[in-house]
Amino acid sequence: MNHLTDEQLSALVDDALEGGARAAAERHLEACADCRGTLAELVAQDRALASTLEHDPGEEYFESFAGRVGDRIRAAGLAGAQAREPGGRGLADWFRVPRKLALVGAVAIVVAGAGIVMLTTREMRVPALREQRIESRAAQEAPTAPSPPGIQPESRSESRPEARSAPQLAAEPVTPLPAAGLAKGTARPQDGSRAKTGIVSREPTVAHDREPRVPTSRAYEVRRNEAGEDVPVGRPDESAYRPLRTMPAPRPAVPGEPVRVQRQRYAEPLGAEKGAEALQIDVRSLPADAGASVSSAGQDAPVAVAKAAREEESKPVAVPIAEQDVPARKELAAPGRVLGLADRADRGPVLQVRGTPEAFDGLPARSRTLAKNAQRLTTVAETIGLAPAWDSAAAGWERLVEDVRGGPLESETRFQVARARFMAWQRAASGKRGARAGQALDGFLAHAPQGAERDSAQTWLARLKK
Amino acid sequence: MKTAPRRSQQLEPGREADLVRAAQAGDQAAFAQIVCHFQRPVHRVAYALTRNASDADDLAQETFVRAYQAIGRFRAGEPLYPWLSRIAVNLTYSLFRRRRRRPETSIEPLVESGRQWASDDDPAERAAESEQHERLAAAFAELSHEHQAVLTLRVVEDLTYDDIARTLGVPVGTVMSRLSRARAELRARFRARTGEGP
């Protein structure tokens, strides 16, 4: 006896067999206990699966759902498809559709590769130029010491141009360049001059009496003006060859006086923990009233104006780096941020986040696990400070929201969600992140008690809207 | 093939098309009505595929955001729900792909049983049934995404074969064969866990 196939049984479950196929299947079922049993199992399995996969978040959830969708649409600044011109697709579409984005990336790679090949090829042509025009031009400007009779000119270094004779150079052709190739320069040839161009190479150490203009070891094109001088064709990137200026040594710091520091430099975060953005230290001019103790060690111990990360507009506090002043560090940490980057130098920074694990001890095991996981993700995010890490942290806290809804930890959890969403948006702003942050902040502020957390959330929301 | 849906995701005849046309003309209130009508089924699909309340919330909202962006290209008169559920399914696939590339958490997979229990259930019976549901959810999570999707649309959403075909963008025959394989594989995996059928 041939049993019913999986497809027949599945169709029977869905009551999708018709006509003769159905009649034949029913006849088989009357005679086959195995197939009857299998069919009964499949029907029971469907029922159980429907029950298992269903989840009703409740009326309250759906009452505000449309509003949240609207917020997200508004935050993303979407106009809706109805506002589009038929067939009118902007450049932005290429960056929204993954396939098109991949195509754009492929084109960019090809272009970049071609550019690299071109650059490499140009560099490789230099030796060939040396053999021909470089030699000739270098020799042209050299003292007219004729070669000894019988000696043929060979490939030489341009630092010995005396080996070539002037009559030989006069016979060599020079390649004219199109006028379009000329760029602004200090020694631009006069209009109407019958200028010709050539290639000259100079070593940076070769002192030339007349033309110390572009000290470079690279060959560059020149054009001869009426006065018989070689002037560079195009605009040499002087900044690329300019010798580095030595930075003036800072004046020794004097207590009570402002300290001037060159531009912006980044000092090591307190505790010498690189990458800990919670204490992004910015060395700038020291406010006279910052109350810092100025080290007399001068540039070895610069005075840092430490400020908390961008989202925390805390008052700048002067911190002498060398002393690693711990109280100052605590002052930097706003509520909800990393507290105290380390007092234990041997074990690295101590990272503490709000909402200690003990606060969630009263919850069921699954919720405790979720809380612990969310805290771990938050710690990671605070350590590395990248937007995806904050996204993960926010997702971690969001998983906990359902479990603590209506309880004393709901506000705390929602604050963590809002903070993580806002941090993610701040690290790498996007419409989606902005919408999520706005939604999370609204969710927290809807039931948040008065206090520092509420103030922070309002500040963040204002910044988000701005 | 005729398959009768147990649930009704459609609005009254003509009403759905009117709302779609109004939304295409820029009527935000009409789009809000579409959201209100379809929010539950879209959320059901999202939750069934992710088994995670947070992900389901995010996916359901994002589904309507995408629908808002693209509703100008939707042909009024066609059933709206298969189109919405297709967006939801595709977003879920994208989420799975991202997760595979960049795992976010060590709690993986996070299976939340959505079973709601009455307070007067017998605790022993409740525990046994809960265990069965957890095993079934775990077996379901082991299926391929295509099999999960087709089972969700048929078993949870009770869509017809035609609507499932529209949603997944495959022929009806493929829906039938995929559904039968998904059921058979789920049964086998569940039996492997328990030694019996559900």
Image (cartoon, coloured by chain):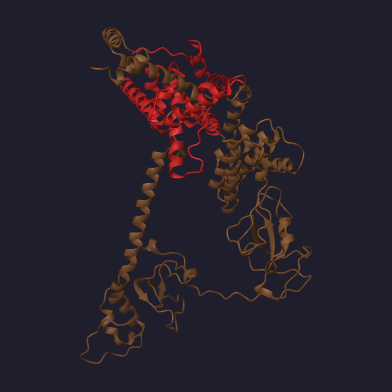
Chain colours: A brown, B red
B129 relative to A447 in the view: left or right: left
Closest to the observer: B175 or A149? B175
Residue at 65% across, 45% down: A357
Q: Residue at x 52, y 20 (%)?
A: B38
Question: What percent of the width, then of the height, locates residue A131?
Answer: 28, 76
Q: Residue at x 50, y 73 (%)?
A: A242
Dividing the image into 4 quarters, which one contains the N terminus of chain A? top left
- A326 up-or-down from A450: above or below: below
Instruction: From the top left corner, tell me how far across and down residue B93 is, in percent.
Output: 43, 34
Where does residue B71 sit, x and y in percent of width and height?
A: 48, 25
Can residue A402 be seen here?
yes
- Note whether residue B25 is visible: no
Quadrant housing residue A466: top right
Q: Position of residue B70 (x, y in %)?
A: 47, 28
Quick check: B49 above or below A295?
above
Q: Nearer the viewer, residue A356 or A412?
A: A356
Considering every residue shown, the one lying at the far bottom of the view is A148
